[in-house]
Image: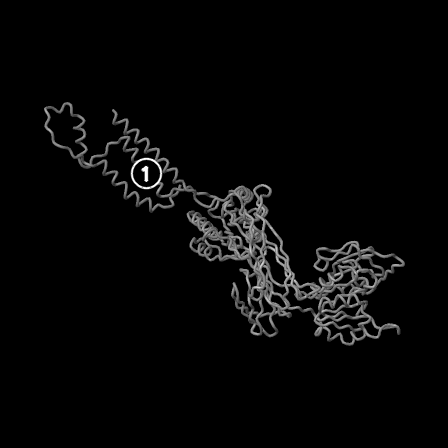
Amino acid sequence: MILLAPGTLLIAALLTVPPLIVFYLLKLRRRPMRVTSTMLWDQAVRDLEVNVPFRWIRPSWLLILHALILAALLIAVGRPAIENGGAGAGRVFLLIDHSASMSAKSGDTTRLDLAKKQARKIIESFSANRTPPEISVVAFAAEPVILGPPSRNPSSVVSLIDSIEPTDQPGDPIGALGLVRSLTQPGEQRDDEESESAATAIVISDGGGLSDRALSIGSARAVLEIVGEPEAAQANIGIVAFAAERGIDSPSSVRIFLRLLNTGSNEAGVPLVIRFDDDPIARRAVTIPAARAGSGSEILPGETAESFTLEIPAGGVLTISVERDDALAADNTVHAVLPPVRRPAVMLVVPEAVRTNQPALARDRADPLLLDVLEAIGTDGLRVVDRRRYLANQTQIAEQFGLVIFDRVRPAEMPPIPTISFGAPLPGSSVATFVRAVDAGRTPVLAWDRDHPVMRDVVLDTVVIADRLVFPEDDEPLNSDDPESAESKSRSTLARGDTGPLIVAIDDAGVQRITVAFSLDQSNWPVHFSFPIFVLSAFDFLVPGGDSGTWARTADPVWIDLPAGVNTANLDGPVARTIEARNVAADHRVPLGRLALAGLYSLDTGVEREPIALNLLDTEESRLSIATAGEAEELVSAGGTLDRGPREIWRWFVLTAGIALLLEWLVFTLKNRV
């Protein structure tokens, strides 16, 4: 047993022990009285002996009980504790969650404040050990960050804890524990639960979204400390999904999609305010259902989806806000940088006229349905040329156009810009096998990749193809004579028929290409409703950012584009930063990493100011869920137990003093009766 406050015990003893001794040595003050005989006053004579100075105190039950009561109370004041041997000399990783949900407010206190307070208590308990552990403080949200070197100094560790700032990023405890695993040396890992060199990870979090798998770090111990009470989980309204894109038929109109979440127990009616470049342009009222009970103790938030279209021809910043105060502000507003109505300049390459009865103009030889779709999309200039004229000017293509479409044309060399090909062999292939419908029959589209961005909204179950090329499978070489010539071309099949792939996406050394194995006049696809959707999705995939609002999530790294010759830029917004780019990539893209706070930023490069939108958009964070006591107990048992330091036992000494005080009263009462 050790005393955590020996100084307090010493001061209390100096103030209380002398009065007790003096009380038993105190000379009695008696009134003189004349008596005829002292025969009946023997007890009085013995009492006079107490007036003799420096005489030893006579032992009695009352004296023993008084001394026991005082000793028990003094020891309790000194904070007696029993040392635990498990954590004294090990290494401790203190993982503090500062994700978006930890910024949820309850009055003037946030969950992060409670987490810091709990962390300071843990440090205080560790510091009472004779051999304090080496403590590393790790703050984690979307990624873990080690705040400083390991230390045994409590004040240094507490200062690191106090330096943790809130973020609007989602939490990733698995990544944080992975960092602990990478830092834990084999000699620090425990062989059993009593190992004094065991490494321990203490995760301080609200526990939302954690599982027992998340607390697994091999043989080292992992313990979860929950902050917040599940029954006190705050009501919150949040935007958890968002999309804004221009329409196909009317590029000046913007289609907006929102999904909103309500964690409260009551149905919520909230106003949405839509702003464009800070000017309000529309308001909408939205009703969100109340949260409901799920399986076990799980509470499922109420959700609703809203979609509407606004006329916004210009480019700028679109902002949608929930005008209501709640527990978490980071998910009440979303931003999107909306480009103006703009499409890349497109060159359409068609075959040369080989017969006199063919139209003289190249535009007249193009597929009319393809031209209609391209004009409906609204390109930044459409030029139609034949193969001969294209080959004569192909060196200037990359400077003037953003996309080239080959209609039944195979160029000798593919341009260094994205392409779409119809009825042309794969780039880099040496042999083109052709299948005619009169010989092999027509083929339907048997399957297509619904997860690929180009095919996600496309339906091809009624599309039929006649004459077509035979494309090799993704794992087959493009050129059997020279397999190494196409090493930089990775392929993925987007759709297939009975003779193999029909639509293939190609990554040609960083340049994206899409190749279709049949010409449009050999299928019913051009008159199918999915064809313009395919072309539009192909535009967005090959030349991204042309029509959809752009933003980044706080969970994702942010990249910026610097103009040529510019190596310094200033980032203004919720997080201000000066960017010094010393080794700028060839495409002038510079990584900023993950920004801590959501909101609207402005990048000043000295040449122009560019807005950058950053949104939370995370369902788990907006739910503000807190792990229940049962879940926390399960996670602790899964990770192991933690002996943080000496276990205080002063309550037992107070109880002992109380029992002794009761005995003293009984002894005093019985003695007076006698």
Please say if 667 is above or below 159: above
Res 470 → quadrant: bottom right
Residue 100 % position (x, y): 53, 55
Return the residue nearer the eye: 317 or 666.
317
Colour setup of the view? one colour
Q: Please state the horizontal and vertical placement of residue 587, each as a whole percent of the image.
A: 64, 69
Secondary structure found at label 1:
helix
Residue 524 is situated, as x and y percent measured from the top left of the image, at 81, 60
Is residue 315 visible in the rendered image? The answer is yes
**Residue at 15% of width from left, 33% of height from top?**
30
Residue at position x 51%, y 65% in the image: 576
Quadrant assignment, res 600: bottom right
Residue 138 appears in the figure: no
Residues 605 and 520: in front is 520
Relative placement, left or right, of 115 versus 298 is left
Q: Which amino acid, mark 1? A: Ala
Q: Nearer the viewer, residue 457 or 86?
A: 457
Q: Residue 184: where, in percent of width, then height?
A: 55, 51
Vertical arrangement, residue 112 with respect to residue 13, above or below:
below
Say which residue appears at 71% left-offset and 62% top-offset: 537
Judged left or right of residue 29, residue 94 is right
Q: Quadrant of the N terminus?
A: top left
Q: Is residue 258 above or below residue 232?
A: below
Residue occupying image coordinates x 62% and y 58%: 242
Residue denoted by label 1: 71
Relative side of 361 to 674, left or right:
right
Q: Residues within 10 Å of mark 1 (few under 14, many from 20)?
A: some
Relative to residue 108, is residue 634 depicted above or below? above
Residue reaching furthest to the right: 439
Q: Quadrant of the C terminus?
A: top left
